[in-house]
Amino acid sequence: MEDMAASGPVSFNNFLKSEQGQNLSEFCLITAVIAVVALVIILGMTGGLHNIWQVANTTSNTAGGGSGAAVR
């Protein structure tokens, strides 16, 4: 019984000094930052992609002489 009491605080001190969980938390933070940056880039590109699609659609409608409806 005395052995368990003696090893208890030592185990707790080892737990406090352990850096094993630190690696996981750093990985999660880096992953979150990458996800936020990717989201900002994607949201920033949506306006440009919409404009490109509009120009392509207008050009194809003008060249085809139609209203953009499917050819039958």
Image (tube, rainbow, N blue to C red):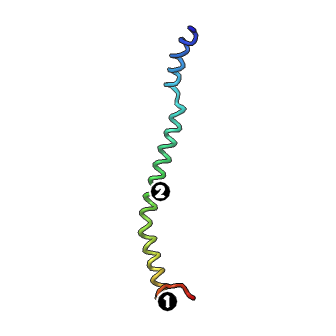
From the top left corner, tell me how far across and down residue 69 is, in percent. 50, 85
Give the labeled residue for mark 2.
Answer: 38
What type is the residue that disc 2 sits on?
A: Ala
Q: Which quadrant, please, contains the N terminus?
A: top right
Q: Based on the displayed image, in which of its 4 quarters is residue 45 positioned?
A: bottom left
Q: Secondary structure at mark 1?
A: helix
From the top left corner, tell me how far across and down residue 50 is, in percent. 44, 72
Q: How far, Cα to Cα, is label 1 from label 2?
A: 36 Å
Instruction: Look at the numbered discs 1 and 2 and tell me whether their residues touch, using CB distance below 8 Å.
Output: no
Of residues 2 and 13, the one nearer the viewer is 2
- What residue is drawn where x is 53% and y is 12%? 5
Give the labeled residue for mark 1.
Answer: 63
Number of numbered callouts drawn: 2
- What residue is drawn where x is 48% and y is 51%? 34
In the displayed structure, 43 sits above or below 50; it is above
Q: Which quadrant, please, contains the C terminus?
A: bottom right
Q: Earlier in the sequence, mark 1 or mark 2?
A: 2
Q: Secondary structure at mark 2?
A: helix
Res. 53 mark? none
- What residue is drawn where x is 57% and y is 13%? 4
